[in-house]
Image (spheres, rainbow, N blue to C red):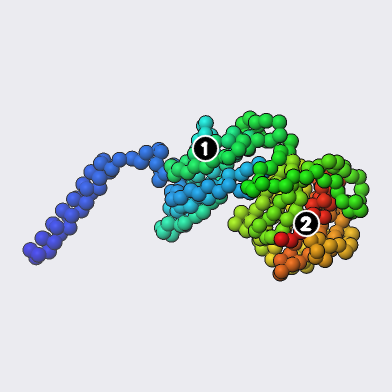
Amino acid sequence: MKKTVFLIAVIVLAAFAGAYYARERSKTIPQQSNASVADNVATKNSTAGLVLVDTVEVHTLESFPVQIQLAVAGNLADGCTKLAEAKIDKSGNHFTVTLPTTRAADVFCTQALVPFTKNISLPVVGLSKGDYTVSVNGVDASFTLASDNVLQGGLVENNQATDEPAKATEPAPATSKTTQPAEGTTTPSGPSAPITNLAFESYTNRSVGYTIDRPSLWYWEHDNKNDIDGTHPNVDDYLIMDTAPLAGLNADPLGLVAIEVSDLPLSAFATDVAGLQKEDATVGGVSAARYSGSVNGEQRVEYQFTRNQKTFRLIYRDATNAGRGADAFAHIVTSFSFN
């Protein structure tokens, strides 16, 4: 009997002690700062916070205008936490990137950290040459613009590009030339907008191993497999060119001219050229098929061939159906050669 009474007394005392400890602990633990990356803000249906970032790498893409992309890596708090849209602010030569998260409220999830990687493009068009810094949720990095990232006609204010194309700055010296389309070269049928005395520069795609003459005053970008990052499965390489600013890899079309290299068979593109006129052609010394015509008001020309188990497509798509840049495309095709 005495043992039973003693055990009951011990249990009651332990309960009171636990309640007291919990009450005192709630008084002494400080509240998280609003600036903390671990801070969460609860709403009725979800919780918002900032993701924990481990590393920030700066990549300078091969393009004009120059593009700066951040490769951000870190960990999500649990299996239910998702990345939200990044917010980018600029003050002077410093970028502040806020990478938030969202999480559904009152749900049970795996409690293990979930690694993530995310690419974030910085708005650097129109910036002057110089050193720049960037902070992503408190993790710092830096980059340098070796020359003014400007368009023809001077500095672009507030990072807003104009429709004026600009001359690209090559990593290595390029050979400039003024070139007319080769005599007898076929251009798309229909109205044409010939480009006379258009300047070209020799450009070598070292990733794939070909050289072309690229219009000097066009916007362009080169994306390899890492840059493409799943937006176009099985595609290894893109070289995209246009007289207007490029809209990114999710755009359709990608640009006025695109050179695509992939692991896909030619049969995978049958739908893309359905209804177009087919002719035999040669590109870079390789037998190719040339397709041309108009589809849904868009003027198209496409060359297709395979080499070393890779499929090459040289694509021209003009949504204005007025032959914009058709002569330039014809010269690009004529100049194409393997290294």
| Residue occupying image coordinates x 59% and y 33% | 128
- Where in the figure is residue 77, as x and y percent of width and height? 43, 53
Residue position marked by numbered label 2 in the rendering: 336
**Chain-order first, disc 2 or disc 1:** 1
Query: Left or right: 288 with respect to 190?
Result: left
Q: Nearer the viewer, residue 110 or 274?
A: 274
Question: Does residue 288 lie above or below 13 as drawn?
Answer: below
> Dot 1 lies on which element?
strand
- Where in the figure is residue 331, as x and y percent of width and height? 82, 51
Query: Left or right: 15 with respect to 65?
Result: left
| Residue occupying image coordinates x 74% and y 41% | 217
Residue type at tag 1: Asp
Kindly report the distance in space between the C-alpha atoms of the residues bearing marks 2 and 1. Answer: 37 Å
Query: Left or right: 102 with respect to 244?
Result: left
Label 1 crowd bin: few (<14), some (14–19), many (20+), radius 10 Å: few
Residue position marked by numbered label 1 in the rendering: 131
Identify the image quadrant of residue 34: top left
Q: Is residue 217 visible?
A: yes
Residue type at tag 2: Phe
- Where in the figure is residue 78, as x and y percent of width and height? 44, 55
Q: Is residue 49 visible?
A: no
Label 2 crowd bin: few (<14), some (14–19), many (20+), radius 10 Å: some
Residue 158, numbered label: none
> Dot 2 lies on which element?
loop
| Residue occupying image coordinates x 91% and y 45% | 191
